[in-house]
Amino acid sequence: MDGQNGSSSICPRPRSAATAGKKKKKIPDRVTLKKEIGLLSACTIIIGNIIGSGIFISPKGVLEHSGSVGLALVVWLLGGCIAALGSLCYAELGVTIPKSGGDYSYVTEIFGGLMGFLLLWSAVLIMYPTTLAVIALTFSNYVLQPVFSNCVPPYMATRMLSATCLLLLTWVNCSSVRMATRIQDIFTVGKLMALGLIIVVGLVQIFNGHYEALTPQVAFSLDRVPSVGQIALAFLQASFAFSGWNFLNYVTEEVVEPRRNLPRAIYISIPLVTFVYTLTNIAYFSSMSPEELLSSNAVAVTFGEKLLGMFSVIMPISVALSTFGGINGYLFTSSRLCFSGAREGHLPSLLAMIHYKNCTPIPALLVCCAATIVILCIGETHNLINYVSFINYLSYGVTIAGLLYYRWKKPNLYRPIKVNLLVPVCYLMFWALLLGFSLYSEPVVCGVGLVIMLTGVPVYFLGVHWKEKPKCIYNFIERATYVGQRLCFVVFPQIDPIEISRQLFRLLELPV
């Protein structure tokens, strides 16, 4: 059942006009990932992946580490500016190396297989399953909050609901790319409306004179002066809320006219999210004292209970909808990372196959879902947010350093977008300061993050670099792949001749 040769990948056309007119799912003429992500869906992928659970979890951590309301707001604003600088660099990389897989694909092309594999290993092992688990737990906690209003929702109830949500959205993503993107569009609008409600209610409070915590004298008053390391940790917490700004680069091959729509989506989405996040935090502080915010485990629910009265149930529902869309977006994009890694030979080849009819990467989606459920079963995941943020920032810095190296290595390569050198340099200066102070302040957290990445070194040399494995291992892999194909009805995607010509032009450093 190999999609690369034979006629098993080529699906029959309808036999008659009458048959063609029926509303049946047509089998595609070419089994390949479809370009079904337009500008609107591209924007909702970025916004939907950024606005997940972070804005409802991270305000507490940012305020705790920064030490004051004013400094916390500055951290949120600068966090958005840093994400904007990074996204500009990713826009150049995305149109220069037009491959799905984001950071992994760029680092593999620029620095080679080992560096790319380490990034892939940490992402598949800890980064994306943990983030998905945190978002899924936030979803279940907010859904169950009205039911268990006087106590914490039971451990098993939250895990079961989180797993059910993951399985449902995995089925949706396995069934149709179009259905998954439509869900993303709808729920992104919903989460923006939810945050819009918080902002409007907060602004009404401010206009009514309730802004004591936001006055400069109070906002910047410090009970304790935060260390530089604490401020770095505040940025790491904010970065968790902004994580996902680079996720459109994971699905570049499915974007319609990526050279035009990829940068446009980035230019629209990042400023919008920064604006919304800053106003949301201002709204929180308009009705909650710093002490109340620090003591709350569900900031948006506490906000709703104080200001919305009998309509306070709107807030947990809104947050649940927001996190539901976030889970869908993370599943959609992280599965493409597994798909790209398998296509490069860094993961089992089964993960590089797609459904012969739906053209969706079912094996990669199932692996992402299974890894997240394992993380859910392990126990408390919120302690892993700092590990995830550290690995995220590490991968961002390596990727953007790769942009500078690629400029030097291939100066004549055609680049449809070419950002000013000050953009990556400024980002890397901030990145180096942040990681340096994080290492100084929290050496254990950062050390664990580095260890997680470095455990991939022996795996790479044993699993990828070592080609002369015993025949029994190859026989087992071949048999497992065959069984997986039969169970999932998947084949290797066919290569588009137009994409081959584009790759050839790019290698020759000619404009396409």
Image (tube, rainbow, N blue to C red):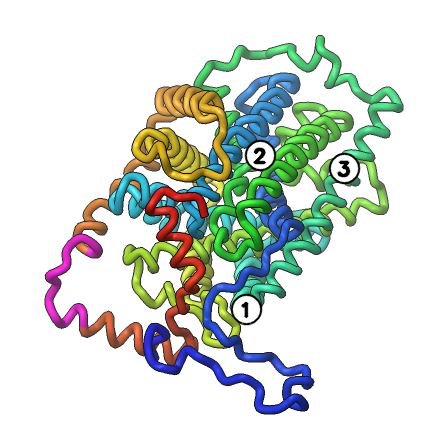
Residue 444 visible in the picture: no
Is residue 466 magenta-colored? Answer: yes
Q: Nearer the viewer, residue 332 or 386?
A: 332
Q: Amino acid at mark 2?
A: Ser
Q: Label 2 belongs to which residue?
A: 58
Tell me the element at label 2.
helix
166 relative to 59, above or below: below
Tell me the element at label 1.
helix
Mark 3 is surrounded, within 10 Å at the Cα level, by few (under 14), some (14 to 19) or many (20 or more) other residues, namely many
Residue that protrudes farthest toward the top in the picture: 217
Q: Nearer the viewer, residue 315 or 465?
A: 465
Magenta-colored span: 463-474
Q: CA separation, marks 1 and 2?
A: 30 Å
Q: Position of residue 480 (x, y in %)?
A: 28, 73
Residue 270 visible in the picture: yes
Q: Position of residue 209 (x, y in %)?
A: 86, 20
Mark 2 is surrounded, within 10 Å at the Cα level, by few (under 14), some (14 to 19) or many (20 or more) other residues, namely many
